[in-house]
């Protein structure tokens, strides 16, 4: 048995040597093709629903081959950590409409050589944003007299773009009589944030992402008990006070309805649900005093709302969204003006909150224009609408200002940095009234166009400390223009157009507001 085993081992060894010698030179070696990927940025930003993610990578093959050869398979993948994963492209060039929810995503580019199995990868990121998440919302009417909402989209790092009809797919009925459009801001929970459209024909809230709405999206959506279907919003506080969408108070919200009632809620606790009006007194919670649409409060920090009782011609105060009633304000013997106007015969014709800090009003003074037929006079009240409110001054409007139509003006706009109020008189011309005591004067202001003015408004939201004045005009064909003006700091007011801040192709704009967040 031993010789037989020895022979077998020797035979196997010789066979291995023979095979090894025969294999030499039989393999045909090929250089593996390498691929370089360029032309893909590290991060992209695309607008939801309307925008496209367009990427054309530069593919360089080491063998000089054609990257569009069918042997190469391309794959674009969108990935959300702990979320969904979607294949969004199968071609080398990506052209994909952003149909995923607004968010930040990882983007994977994969190339496979189907003949060799080689795989190349490139990773990037992209953000899906809404074109209406940042910029100026504008409301006006088109040539047919119908409400139209437009937006000057001002996304960071991108050029300003005009979007012309944000209500096109809202599913709302045709609206007339534009009043306001605004975003409620970034304060409070995300489920309480809305875009509101206020018109003479109705007030509706709109989903802040999709811009969808419905005829039932009214104030009744937030009422604990049923109300009349036509319950319309006419004013809401607080409003946005800074560029990022922050407001003057976090968690509280106040509004006035078309029937003159005022409501309040701690939205951070109750989720924006409202029950009973608060325009009443503690000794009679069932008697409601109709409120003017004006709400006075310190823009930078809200701890109270001063409102105006139109039945009794008096200012009242509401101090907390946990209270069920308002409170009467008391007057001192030497006050500059009374809170209760009953004996004076004066009535409120206009109100505005500003950034004016004179008198120690660090969070911003408010102004009320009061007119009295019995006194044949008009007054400007200046006060700090905090709790407790503080009276700052009472100015008697000059006879010259009243002669050119101050009392019956179409629009008013108070400067925060100077004792100036601009107004558009009945002759449709713009005037400036300097109400500084001892230096009162009124004069027309040239804005370089004869087109009719449809709005004047100081920016308290985007650049709140700069005191820029926005003026909207329209021509005979109802085509609108919006211009941003700076104001000199001394002497007679001169409005200077800010470079690259005039926008045309608008409807007849009647109001605008800033949106700075989702």
Image (tube, grey):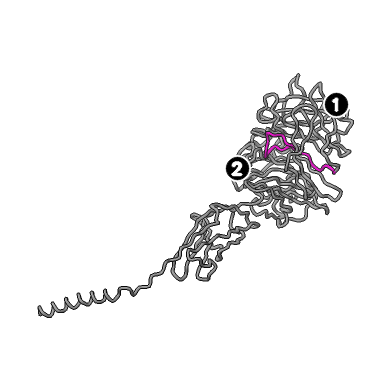
- Residue 223: in sight, yes or no? no
Q: Few, some or many C-alpha atoms within 10 Å of disc 2 (few <14, some 14-19, many ≥20)? A: many
Q: Does the magenta stretch include residue 21?
A: no
* Residue 456, horizontal then vertical, whole percent: 78, 39
Q: Name the residue under label 2.
A: 188
- Looking at the picture, tell me which residue is in the foreground, 173 or 105: 105
- Looking at the picture, tell me which residue is in the foreground, 81 or 388: 81
Q: What stretch is highlighted in magenta?
A: 451-469
Q: Quadrant of residue 302?
A: top right
Q: Is residue 468 magenta?
A: yes
Q: How far apart are marks 2 and 1 (CA)?
A: 44 Å
Q: Few, some or many C-alpha atoms within 10 Å of disc 1 (few <14, some 14-19, many ≥20)? A: some
| Residue 169 to residue 306: above or below | below
- Looking at the picture, tell me which residue is in the foreground, 93 or 399: 93
Would residue 25 appear left or right of 431 to someone viewing this image? Answer: left
Q: Name the residue under label 1.
A: 398
**Circle 2 — which element?**
loop
Q: Quadrant of residue 262?
A: top right
* Residue 153, horizontal then vertical, whole percent: 68, 48
- Residue 429: in sight, yes or no? yes
* Residue 270, horizontal then vertical, whole percent: 60, 44
């Amino acid at each position: 048995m031993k010789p037989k085993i020895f022979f077998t081992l020797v035979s196997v060894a010789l066979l291995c040597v023979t095979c090894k010698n025969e294999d030499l030179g039989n393999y045909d070696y090929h250089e593996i093709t390498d691929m370089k990927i360029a032309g893909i940025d590290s991060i992209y930003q695309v607008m939801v629903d309307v925008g496209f993610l367009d990427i054309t990578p530069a593919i360089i093959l080491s063998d000089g081959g054609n990257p569009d050869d069918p042997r190469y398979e391309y794959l674009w993948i969108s990935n959300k950590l702990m979320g969904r994963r979607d294949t969004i492209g199968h071609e080398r060039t990506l052209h994909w409409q952003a149909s995923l929810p607004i968010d930040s995503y990882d983007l994977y580019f994969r190339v496979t050589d189907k003949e060799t199995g080689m795989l190349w990868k490139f990773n990037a990121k992209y953000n899906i944003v809404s074109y209406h998440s940042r910029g100026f919302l504008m409301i006006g009417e088109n040539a047919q007299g119908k409400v139209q909402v437009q937006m000057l989209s001002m996304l960071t790092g991108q050029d300003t773009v005009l979007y012309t009809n944000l209500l096109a797919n809202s599913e709302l009925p045709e609206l007339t009589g534009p009043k306001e459009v605004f975003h409620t801001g970034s304060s409070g929970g995300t489920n309480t944030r809305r875009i509101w459209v206020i018109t003479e024909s109705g007030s509706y809230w709109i989903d802040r992402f999709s811009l969808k709405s419905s005829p039932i999206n009214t104030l009744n959506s937030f009422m604990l008990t049923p109300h009349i279907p036509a319950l319309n919003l006419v004013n809401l506080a607080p409003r946005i006070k800074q560029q990022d969408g922050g407001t003057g108070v976090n968690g509280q919200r106040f509004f006035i309805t078309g029937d003159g009632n005022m409501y309040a809620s701690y939205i951070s606790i109750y989720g924006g649900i409202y029950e009973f009006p608060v325009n009443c007194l503690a000794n009679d919670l069932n008697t409601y005093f109709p409120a003017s649409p004006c709400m006075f409060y310190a823009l930078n920090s809200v701890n109270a709302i001063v409102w105006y009782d139109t039945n009794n011609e008096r200012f009242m105060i509401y101090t907390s969204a946990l209270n069920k009633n308002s409170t009467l304000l008391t007057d001192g013997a030497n006050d500059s003006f009374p809170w209760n106007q009953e004996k004076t015969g004066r009535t409120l014709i206009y109100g505005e909150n500003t950034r004016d800090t004179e008198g120690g009003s660090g969070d911003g003074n408010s102004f009320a224009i009061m007119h009295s037929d019995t006194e044949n006079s008009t007054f400007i009240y200046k006060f700090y609408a905090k709790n407790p409110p503080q009276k700052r001054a009472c100015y008697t409007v000059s006879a010259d200002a009243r002669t050119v139509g101050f009392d019956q003006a179409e629009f008013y706009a108070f400067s925060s940095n100077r004792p100036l109020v601009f107004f558009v008189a009945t002759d449709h011309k713009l005037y400036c009234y300097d109400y500084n005591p001892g230096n009162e004067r009124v004069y027309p202001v040239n804005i370089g166009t004869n087109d009719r003015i449809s709005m004047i408004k100081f920016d308290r939201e985007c650049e709140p400390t700069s005191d820029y004045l926005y003026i909207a005009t329209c021509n005979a064909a109802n085509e609108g223009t919006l211009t941003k003006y700076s104001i000199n700091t001394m002497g007679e007011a001169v409005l200077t157009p800010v470079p690259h801040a005039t926008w045309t192709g608008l409807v007849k704009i009647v109001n605008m507001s800033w949106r700075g967040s989702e």
